Amino acid sequence: TFWSITIGSVFNWVSFIAIQPGASQRFIAVATFKEAKAVAFWACVGYLVVKILMILVGLLLYANYHDCDPVATQIVQKSGQILPHYVMQVSRDYPGLTGLFISGVLSAALSTMSACLNTVAGTLYEDLVRYLLRGKKQTEAMQAYTLKIIVLVIGIACIGLVSVVEKLGTLFQMAISLSGVSNGTMVGMFVLGLFFPRANTKCFS
């Protein structure tokens, strides 16, 4: 519904931009607090542009298929296949346009995947590997090698789960549902810590 998207998206994006390790690592990587604020500002600008483009694409698909639902008529099996089907229709008379679309989708997916793998590997190393290897000295070369092994293992696991995800229905809806469970809890804990300083790490350990 309108209200679930409006209210839920606020908490979801607060978690995504301010709390999740991927965003935190980028804030920590800059030298000053002013640069961190600039990173947050330009990230919001970029997200806004992407969201506007997504809305325009949705309106374009609705205008084209308002009197003929491709899912209801079994032209496509899932709603996530409507955009590729539209691109295939439009690009029939324009050689190379389909390849450009596919390359763009794959580039965006690989870029996001590489950032996520880097974030997960860094988080696992800091929270798990360092704890298991406490007291043992690790050189920078050993740390880099360990991170590469973690990325390789996680990447193989992601590839193996592709066949499972394919059978779970709409990927976007599943991602929103799973992220809502974790993001709501994270935002609640951080807000509690902001307004009640006595709620420290001991409360959640």
Image (cartoon, rainbow, N blue to C red):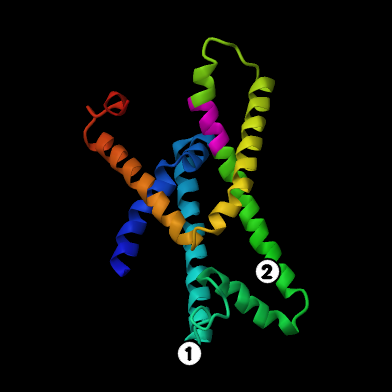
Is the stretch drawn in magenta largely helix, strand or loop? helix
First to last magenta residue range: 120-127
Q: How many marks?
A: 2
Label 1 crowd (10 A; few <14 / some 14-19 / many >=20): few
* Quadrant that contains the N terminus: bottom left
Any part of residue 118 in sight: yes
Any part of residue 13 in sight: no
Q: Nearer the viewer, residue 204 or 20?
A: 204
Taking the spot 56% from the left edge, 75% from the top edge, the residue there is 82
Corner quadrant of residue 144: top right
- Residue 176 shown in magenta: no
Label 2 crowd (10 A; few <14 / some 14-19 / many >=20): some
- Residue 121 shown in magenta: yes
Q: Is residue 181 left or right of residue 26?
A: left
The residue where tag 2 is placed is 101
Taking the spot 49% from the left edge, 63% from the top edge, the residue there is 170
Q: Nearer the viewer, residue 136 or 166?
A: 166
Give the numbered dot on residue 67. Answer: 1
- Label 1 or label 2, whichever lies nearer to me, is 1
At label 2, the amino acid type is Phe
At label 1, the amino acid type is Asp
* Vertical relation: 90 (above or below) 98: below
Residue 110 place in picture, x, y as percent:
65, 52
